[in-house]
Amino acid sequence: MPKEVTDVICPFCGTLCDDLIITVSDDNKTILGVKNACAIGAEKFNHQRLPGRVKRPRMRQADGTYKEVTYDEAIDWTAKMLVKSRKTLMYGWASTSCQAMSIGHEIAEKCGGIVDNCATVCHGSSLIAIEDVGVPSCTLGEIKNRADCVIFWGCNPAHAHPRHMSRYSIFPRGFFTVKGHKGRKIYCVDCRYTDTAKCADKFIQVQQGFDYELLNAFRTAVRGEALPDTVGGVPKEKIYEIAESFKTARFGIIFFGMGLTHTMGRNHNIDIAINLTRDMNEYTKFAIMAMRGHWNVTGSGQVLGWQYGFPYAVDVSRRDQARHQTGETTSVDLLNRNEVEACFYIATDPGAHFPVDAMISSSRKPTVTIDPHINCTTEISDIHIPVAMVGVETGGCAYRMDNVPIETRKVVEPPEGMLTDEELLTKINKRVDELLAKGGA
Ligand code: SF4
């Protein structure tokens, strides 16, 4: 008889919805149905039974084809690559567990690597701003229960975090928000009219690249000082009116996305958004939160943060110290400058996201990709090592976008003989130890 597993965590986006119901076959091997997830979350679970899923490591041959190898062979090849290379880029980590990350960092310390995560191409600038000026934030639970003024700035959760609005930010009824959507004022600031804008009470169309100026104008308007006639394409009357309505809110929240982090100004956009939030706390309660994308990219920042003091792009190639410098230790810059000798990708797909020049540079180096499925990066790697899907076929700790740690659940058994990220990294770590004890690869 098929059975239902309840309270399953969705391992797709930073919302980490925790109310999924998954129907599994009686032998505990196949997912038969997914309830409560959005379309992208459900797809993640459905990929567990993808026809043609790779179940054993594959090594690229001289003619470009792939040959199946054993896990032991793949582990030996990977450990030798790590030990031989003086500087290995160890990039990814956003879709695996915090436990796996900490084993990976141990390997990086022994072999002299650079550990970087997906923040390097998304919210890295937010993390720089937070290091500079701090962050007045809160949990998603507080937003559900208290927020009556919700601002989406440069983000589009209707597409990127589809259940965010129904679980936390727009529609749910909470302890102090009993009217749900009717009791909240929703603002959307974007240069385009997005699907999130359709749900907003007010859409503020900012001229592309003028977010900093508009945020600065809101700070000015909140203080009641003079503004020019328009700022970033928005008339001053509208800015004053909205600034006044922010002040009368009981609890306001600014959610921001890549529209702020990856437009002109970058970390300074976040810096001033945080300062606007801080100003608002002179009048009412206000908080700010980054819309983190990959489901455990926040966790990677947390683990790196408590181990080394930097949330991404951490260079431990000198063994005795950890360094971080945006532009110097960040993945794309390292690849563009041809500064690493090997690439180790795990739980990510830089082939789909990095600039083409960086991936051309990567494709010329010994490369290992650890991922449950075939993706753009596996196809330019020397070895692709498939692993169990974290949050589906094995559990592990993940951090939600509000920095709340949540233990993900194992729902079904992985394919027979397939290793989890933790098991694989533990074996690579052990092989690295053996090679180093012998004096090298
Ligand atoms: S909103 Fe995100 S976490 Fe929730 S079900 Fe959809 S993909 Fe999964």
Image: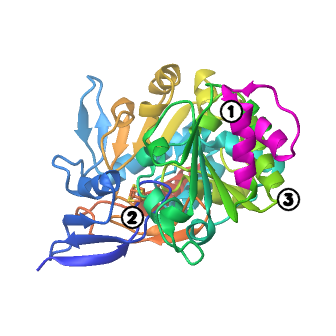
User: What span is in magenta?
Assistant: 217-246
Describe the element under mark 3 as helix, strand or loop.
Answer: loop
On residue 282, the disc is 3
Q: How many marks?
A: 3
Above or below — where is 85 with respect to 419?
Answer: above
Q: Nearer the viewer, residue 414 or 183?
A: 183
Residue at the location (25% across, 34% down)? 66
Examine the structure image and report whether residue 235 is included in the region drawn in magenta.
Answer: yes
Residue 269, image x, y percentages: 72, 37
Residue at the location (33% across, 38% down)? 375
* The N terminus, quarter of image: bottom left
Describe the element under mark 1 as helix, strand or loop.
Answer: helix
Cα distance between the residues tagged 2 and 1:
37 Å
Above or below — where is 157 with respect to 174?
Answer: above
Residue at the location (47% across, 57% down)? 165
**Sequence-earlier tag: 2 or 3:** 3
On residue 211, the disc is 1
